[in-house]
Image (spheres, rainbow, N blue to C red):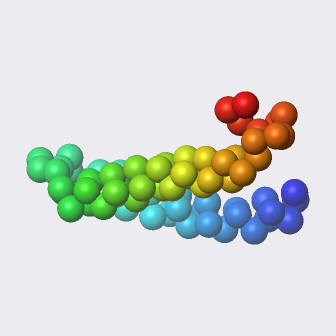
Amino acid sequence: MVNLIARVMPFLWAGFAFAEDVKDAPIPTEMNWVGITIFALIFFGGTAGFIFAVWWKARGKKGDENAPGT
């Protein structure tokens, strides 16, 4: 755990350093629809893919008492 924290800390400090540059940035007046569309596709596609993977794995376990949906 200590090793993981030691590896993550430089990325956190770099993030804090980059955040200093944008804290006084003006509020955007229009939305970026391309970015929102890409985010929605990735988010909902990943969610649907996860649900499908869980369903596919549980599909063959009809006799298993620990399988979801039984």
Residue drawn at (75%, 42%) of the image: 62
Query: Image check: 52 left or right of 36?
Result: right
User: Could one spot residue 65 in this view of the protein?
Assistant: yes
Residue drawn at (49%, 49%) of the image: 47
User: Could one spot residue 54 in this view of the protein?
Assistant: no
Between 12 and 32, the one nearer to me in the picture: 32
Between 4 and 55, the one nearer to me in the picture: 55
In this view, 66 is above or below 14: above
Query: Image check: 26 left or right of 65?
Result: left
In the image, farthest residue toward the left? 30
In this view, 50 is above or below 17: above
Q: Where is residue 32, by image quadrant?
A: bottom left
Residue drawn at (21%, 62%) of the image: 34
In this view, 27 is above or below 66: below
The percent position of residue 27, horizontal first and vertical second, equals: 20, 46
Query: Image check: 57 left or right of 38?
Result: right
Residue drawn at (78%, 59%) of the image: 5
- The quadrant of the picture occupied by the N terminus is bottom right
The percent position of residue 36, horizontal first and vertical second, equals: 26, 54
Q: How many labels does the image show?
A: 0
In the image, farthest residue toward the top? 70
Between 24 and 56, the one nearer to me in the picture: 56
In the image, farthest residue toward the front? 63
- The quadrant of the picture occupied by the C terminus is top right
